[in-house]
Image: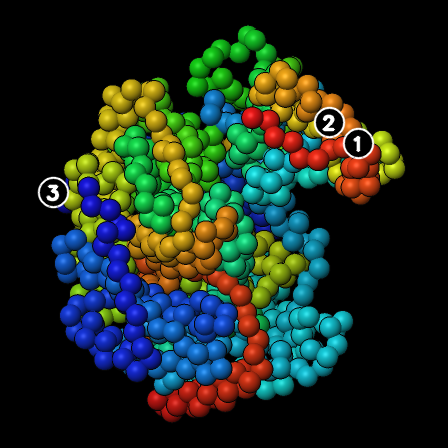
Amino acid sequence: MKKVSQMRAFGSLLSWLYKKPATVDGLFGFIAPASRGFPKRNSDLCTGCGACNERCSSGATSIADKDAIRTMSIDTLRCIFCARCADICPEGALDFTFKSEIPDNVPDNMYFFGITDSKEIPEISKGIVRHICLSHTIDEQSQSIETTLPLQKCPVCGEILPVSEKFLEVVSQRTLEHLQPDAAEIVREDMKKYLRTCISCRREMSKEWNTYPRKFI
Amino acid sequence: MDPFWLNPIIAFFCGIFLSFFFRKVNARIQGRRGPLIIVPQSLHDINHSKVLQPLYDILKLFSKKTIIPTAARSLFILSPVFAFLCAFTACFFVPVAGIAYVYPFSLVILFYLLMGELLFEIVGGIASGSLFSVIGGVREVELLLANELPFILGTFALAISYNTLSIQEMMGFHILTNPFAAIALFLAILVKLHMKPFDISEAESEIVSGLTTEYNGKLLGLLDATKIIMLFVLVALFAGLFLWVPATGLAAWFIFLAGIGATVLMLAIVHSLFSRFRIDQATRWLLKVPLALSIIAVILAVVQRYVL
Amino acid sequence: MSKQSDLFKVQDVSRENLIPEVTDLMNSGARLMYASGVDRGVFGFQLDYHFCFDDEAKSRYLLLRALVKRNEPTIPSLTPITTQADWAEREIIEFLGVKVEDHPDPRHLWLPLNWDDTHAKPDLEQNPESKRINTDSPKKPPSDHIFIQPLSVVPYGPYHPALIESNFLKMSVEDETVIDADLKLGFNHRSIIKLMERRDYYKDIYLSERICGFCNVHHTLTFVMAVENILGIEIPQKANYIRTLLGELERMKSHLLAIGLLGELTGFKTMLMHSLRLREEILDSLEVISGQRISHGAMTLGGVKIDITPVHADFIRSRLKSLKASVSEFFEQYLANDILIDRLKNVGHLSPADARTYGAVGPLVRGSGHPFDVRKQFPYAAYEDVSWEVITENGADSLARLKVRMREFMVSLDICEQCCDILRSVPSSSPIVSTMSELPCGEGVAKTEPPRGELLYHVASNGTNTPEFVRLRVPTFPNAPILLRLIKGGNIADVPVVIGSIDPCFSCTDRATVVQANKEIIIQKSSKTNESGERIKRGGK
């Protein structure tokens, strides 16, 4: 009896001689829809606040200030696609997606991507293929997703502040939104004076501008 | 006169195809594709076909620099050459589609050449000064001692039934008349070629690659070429002795190729279906089953020749 | 549901009382899981001895804490009482410079054995520009007892086909019989614990994920659980089921590869290939859930990041169904091979008593007949809500361990199916992350059962956004010294089999910390090393 079951086991192994091999055709199997895709930054929304840089656990994001320009970049080769920067971004500027590159005619099921030969790759989705085999394209330079933002200059002394113009704009907007109209009027006047000024100028000009602490109750 | 001097060239190229076939069968049982016969269009910058992959492997090794360990002795370099010469010479005596050097004691010569090839491999490995090679060498010697008896007795069973020591005279479809000898010889070939249950002397996970641990470059290429010729020689010997139907011309070639193909298929199946013996288990098993089979084969041959 | 934090107890112990306390504990059936040291600045060195009690139904957890002075860092060694303390104490010696008195074998565990020789160079400190790594040949040979003269030494590693990860196993052999063996770690050392101390908790989750590729779900889960124990928050039930499902999928994935690798180590490559083919189904399931095949990034503080929808659950369910049939066929093929069974039977025999004495964990101890499983003794995630049994085998050899893995695979499959059924019925709007308050000061300990055994995390918070310290003990840490005991006296051909049956993960073990090169201590240590080297040399003859 034991011999019979042994022979059956050997037979089932041998049956692989005429079965189809288990290895996947072509280079890839399938891409699951849960695959997060690549980070994409909407440059119109990004304020350069640096929250993504604070949250990134792999050190893929970086902020570089040079010549009054702030460059926010993500190194896609270092990115581990955890999407925590997208979660934390206060402006919702970051997104992880393939969506803009996927053609409309691809069916919306689990296996939208079963390549058997390079001929069968849809022309539009070749971009996706190149992105996915990052490890294969060593010659290619690391792709970085960059956004450049002008930095704020102090209107008094001309010193470059470590914040972008857009960030201050958004900050003042948000602050004013939550204030009473009469208080907002005073704050707007104050902000015009000192929000974009550097610290030393603010101290020097405080008497002239009369920006002592106010109480809005 | 028969063109027996073509045998080594046929052996080398046939051996490459057999090696490819062996890899392919092995891969298919493992659920893989194996070396592709037709490579898809997208990978054509690599190659169009992988049938000659064993040849490319050897050519790659021959294009590489050979590093010789400081602890190695001169036999380290000489042994692969001698082993290759042994295998090369053995090709003359093994019938390729019925063609071989006609000599009345060719079986005895073949025994010595096959054993000599293994011995030179052992000597070269031990001369490398590597510990893994030494362990591999000791294992190889143990296997050789346990294996030589069934190998010789299995072939001598046929020699007894034909009363000759010339391989050409004892060829035939003997797998039916003396199946025990066929099984004994098949198992002996497994050991001689280091196929799976008996690849103890080059067990990768235990002693890296045994005797050939320190070999590299051109010397390893030479050893690989020897291995391919040995595969052909032993398979052709088995096909000639047990799977041969007397014929001439194209029919002979067809029968011969079918015979070696079937033998390699069986070897590949056994290779992929079993795990490795430990050395003590292997020697015990070799001295039990194949020896018993070969003794039965000899008794059967004696009975067939003298009693019936 | 009783939480792990309720069973956790810290007890201070003085330096003098340590030996009697530990002797009492060991007599009452305790197991020393780990001994860790923390540098507490002016307070001195804090030494934590983690004990658990396997015999009790709901296993208790005791932490003995001794504080030694900074100017006099000595502590009596526990290794004479129990060998379970051996490697942990060597680690303390190495990382903190605490002098462990009467340790029988205080050699380097992580650093090179000739480290003292190369790094006690006087000009190194005076001239910071000098070479950081000394490439000169050592002045004296490495203090290494393994080179016993008439015998030859077989090196396995740092790179060897039998070892998937790099470590250095040295064996002195006599006619293919292993007389003595020694293991050298530290080839994958990446200081992950130290890195965790300077990053915030959310970044630490991703860091702990990268300690091990095989058990990344369990590493993140254990770290997250330890922090949650500090917070004292409840996890949504759906998140618990998702955690259980991910953990069990990972166990199946790892066990299948371990089974295949054992085949490859005994020369049965066909089995490895087929196990990889079957493993692909599990990897596909995980990819569908998380988008990644290996590291999923699924855990977060207070729950999970990734939701499992009914569609996902159905997909996994269908994959598991096809897997169930093909895997049982695969196991049949595996066990039908008589040559393979002969290679495994009676190889690496670890008797049930020895398994307790040496403190084995995971399939190693379950293969010796003890039903020790953290999932039952210390329930976490949703293991109390699904029905399953602990697997044990009585063979105590490599074959028994293989069978434990095979049967555990089927149990995991069952648990996964139960989880999928529950997740399919849970409304999709139910929460997967609970809200958190501020992290208080405190300590948290968590244990889980990764595929290889028991994983322990000890996290302390000081109220800031980075942990005060993180200490972790991986399952291979107690199992690797047992590996050395098992291969001693056996054939050299059995060494890969024993390694494969224990399935060690040396990259896990090589996580770890900072090196403090205190010159005085180094000199003291080197003199001791010589003595012990001599002693063992005599013993060998």
Above or below, B232 relative to A55? below
Kindly indicate the quadrant of the structure image that contains residue C368: bottom left
Residue B12 vs residue A156, the one in the foreground: A156
Report the chain holding disc 3: A
Residue depth check, mark 2 versus mark 3: number of the one nearer the observer: 2
From the image, tell me which residue sits under label 3: A1
Q: Picture coordinates of residue C159 (x, y %)?
A: 52, 61
Horizontal side of B244 relative to A190 (left or right) equals left
Of callouts 2 and 3, the N-terminal one: 3
Horizontal side of B308 relative to C239 (left or right) equals left
Above or below, C323 relative to B161? above
Report the residue at 21% width, 67% height from top.
C30
Report the residue at 28% width, 26% height from top.
C423
Q: Disc 1, disc 3: CB below 8 Å? A: no
Disc 2 residue type? Asp
Q: Which mark is residue A209?
A: 1
Disc 2 secondary structure class: helix
